[in-house]
Image (spheres, grey):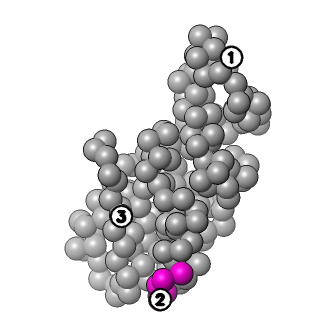
């Protein structure tokens, strides 16, 4: 996670270029030192995909986006809200956490949510974003969910699994 992408001038560049031609941006190169044009384009493409699918994320300043494949694979907010309305309890563990949208909505129905994501970079992004979204009852774990669950001593009320439908 390149936190330089969160600087105000870089965020302004990303927002200004949301509707611009990506090919032209790639050709121009990055106007910032320490940030590649690929990183900028990844943020722009992912934020574009989030506009309708993840309006809470889209409308929150300084959200850090993963690659567009992770955005494509994540539940929409509408779907996550629906799933969260079906269950409640003290502790839920999401064994295949992904971008954390489901965990975010489950955190409204549970006292504690454990978000497991084996991709360390994605887990770091989710941890950062959930703090921005004030989802303070979510624990992020950069680990294989099943391995983590096997070691778990506390009572888990609900185990949630929604694996990626694509191989990484």
Q: Which mark is residue 110?
A: none
Q: Which residues are magenta?
A: 85-90
Residue located 49% across and 87% down the image: 88
| Circle 1 SS class | loop
Label 2 and label 1: CA atoms lie apart by 49 Å
Task: Name the residue beneath numbered marker 3.
Answer: 162
Task: Name the residue beneath numbered marker 1.
Answer: 31
Residue located 66% across and 47% down the image: 51
Task: Name the residue beneath numbered marker 2.
Answer: 89
Q: How would you rate the neighbour count of disc 3 (Cα within 10 Å): few for under 14, some for 14-19, many for 20 or more?
A: some
User: Residue 47: where, in percent of width, then height?
Assistant: 62, 41
User: Residue 101: where, in percent of width, then height?
Assistant: 53, 61
Label 2 and label 3: CA atoms lie apart by 19 Å
Q: Is residue 103 above or below residue 142?
A: below
Q: Return the disc, 3 or 1, that comes first in the chain's sequence.
A: 1
Q: Nearer the viewer, residue 1 or 59?
A: 59
């Amino acid at each position: 996670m390149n936190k330089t992408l969160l600087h105000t001038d870089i965020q302004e560049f990303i927002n200004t270029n949301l509707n611009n031609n990506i090919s032209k941006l790639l050709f121009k190169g990055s106007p910032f030192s320490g940030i590649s044009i690929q990183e900028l384009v990844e943020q722009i493409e992912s934020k574009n995909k989030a506009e309708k699918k993840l309006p809470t994320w889209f409308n929150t300043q300084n959200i850090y986006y993963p690659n567009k494949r992770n955005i494509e694979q994540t539940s929409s907010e509408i779907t996550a809200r629906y799933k969260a309305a079906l269950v409640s309890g003290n502790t839920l563990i999401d064994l295949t956490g992904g971008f954390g949208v489901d965990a975010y909505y489950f955190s409204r129905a549970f006292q504690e949510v454990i978000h497991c994501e084996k991709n360390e970079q994605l887990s770091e992004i989710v941890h950062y974003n959930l703090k921005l979204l004030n989802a303070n009852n979510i624990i992020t774990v950069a680990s294989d969910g099943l391995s983590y669950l096997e070691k778990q001593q506390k009572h888990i009320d609900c185990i949630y699994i929604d694996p990626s439908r694509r191989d990484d």
